[in-house]
Amino acid sequence: MATLCRPAIAVPEHVITLEETLDLARTLHAGHPQLGLALRLIENTGVRTRHLVQPIEETLTHPGFAVRNQVYEREAKLRVPEVVERALGHAELEARDVDLIIYVSCTGFMMPSMTAWLINTMGFRSDTRQVPIAQLGCAAGGAAVNRAHDFCRAYPGANVLIVACEFCSLCYQPTDLGVGSLLSNGLFGDAIAAVVMRGHGGTGVHIERNGSHLVPNTENWISYGIKETGFHFQLDKRVPGTMEMLAPALRSLAGAHGWDVSGLGFHIVHAGGPRILDDLCHFLNMEPANFRYSRATLTERGNIASAVVFDALARLFADGGVPEGTPGLIAGFGPGITAEMSLGSWAENQGEPVRRRPRAISTSDITLVHPVAPRRFPAGTTITD
């Protein structure tokens, strides 16, 4: 039984409001021929606040791709460990109990992956497997849940740590002036999420089935242009309508499991924008309240890429969860166009004992697991569970 436990979430301390975003757009792009359209699109996103890893003055400058990637690595190493510690605490596990770390991010690059740094600095075993996912964009949160489920099925009793670190603001490109780019400047935010899938026990979503669906011939609809200045986000105008193509995949996966996707007790989906949620209501014949957690994430934090599904799931936990056995859906959507979907039922721990791995001991009877030093986030960082 693989159970996705309560996620830990943190957003940076620098906040930008919708009003500030609109004022900046009017100032920076005063002569843009489609400024009025861009402003209307930004207002219609429903995003009211976003969190940024740097002050807005630094966010708007472009010191070069190398410097930006250095900021990504520095801030990730500063902020990720505390979120991981809380996620492990929610799952009632320790670092040595983790068998696989999945790290997802599409907003910065490290090699070796962040997984290697976490293993070396946080007391994870040296035989912990590593799966970095860098090219699935917003769908990567759902993909990470699916790959964790696959691993737990292949290795019963194994535990998986998932980390999503997205600093979308580091992808801001001041020379990209298309309407799609201007819209993305008012849509994306920064966040870190971590969550554990326990092989035995735990309270959360007992994952029962997962699946993927790629819409043929849409690989250019969401993409990065890789240039000297870094990642340039490219968004096709047809993207907002993709739920007409992906909603049937959600219904099909649930049907194969003997469930009706429209009648499930909870729906945790990636909210790339308000139309995604509106169209899901339409094509799946559901009420807007079914997607209230995803919409709250969009409103308060913007599109935080792969971290959206974990932030929305954390809101379900904060709301008290749902009754034992309630069926539900978790789904991420992103480049491809790809849907990564999983089905599960709410499970309570029922006092099942934690199955801990013994500490590794050297021939001289000295523990190989090092204690983790206390870590602090920068003042003002918002930390939520």
Image (cartoon, helix red, strand yellow):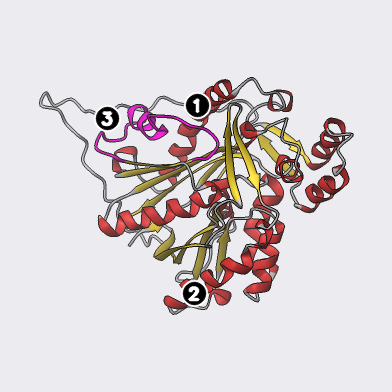
On residue 73, the disc is: 1
Q: Where in the figure is residue 18, as x and y percent of width and height?
A: 79, 42
Q: Quick one: 5 or 180, which is closer to the camera?
A: 180
Q: Amino acid at mark 3?
A: Val
Q: CA distance from mark 3 to mark 1?
A: 24 Å
Residue with the mark numbered 3 = 369
Q: Identify the residue at horizontal 48%, vertical 55% (top origin).
A: 142
Q: Where in the figure is residue 116, as x and y percent of width and height?
A: 35, 31
Image: 30 above or below 144: above
Figure disc tally: 3
Q: Quick one: 30 or 278, which is closer to the camera?
A: 30
Quadrant occupied by the N terminus: bottom left
Mark 3 or 1, closer to the camera: 1
On residue 150, the disc is: none
Which numbered disc, 3 or 2, marks the residue that appears first in the sequence? 2
Mark 2 or 1, closer to the camera: 2
Residue 199 visible from this viewpoint: no
Q: Quick one: 231 or 160, which is closer to the camera?
A: 231
Q: Which class describes the residues within 10 Å of circle 1: few (<14), some (14-19), or many (20+)? A: some
Most distant residue in the front direction? 217
Magenta segment main secondary structure: loop
Which numbered disc, 3 or 1, marks the residue that appears first in the sequence? 1
Q: Amino acid at mark 2?
A: Ser
Residue with the mark numbered 2 = 252
Which numbered disc, 2 or 1, marks the residue that appears first in the sequence? 1
Q: Identify the residue at horizontal 76%, vertical 52% (top origin).
A: 46
Most distant residue in the left direction? 363
Label 3 with label 1: CB-CB less than 8 Å: no
Q: Quick one: 217 or 118, which is closer to the camera?
A: 217
Q: Identify the residue at horizontal 44%, vertical 38% (top origin).
A: 84
Q: Where in the figure is residue 354, as x and y percent of width and height?
A: 30, 51
Tell me which corner region of the image, top left, top right, bottom left or bottom right, holds residue 384: top right
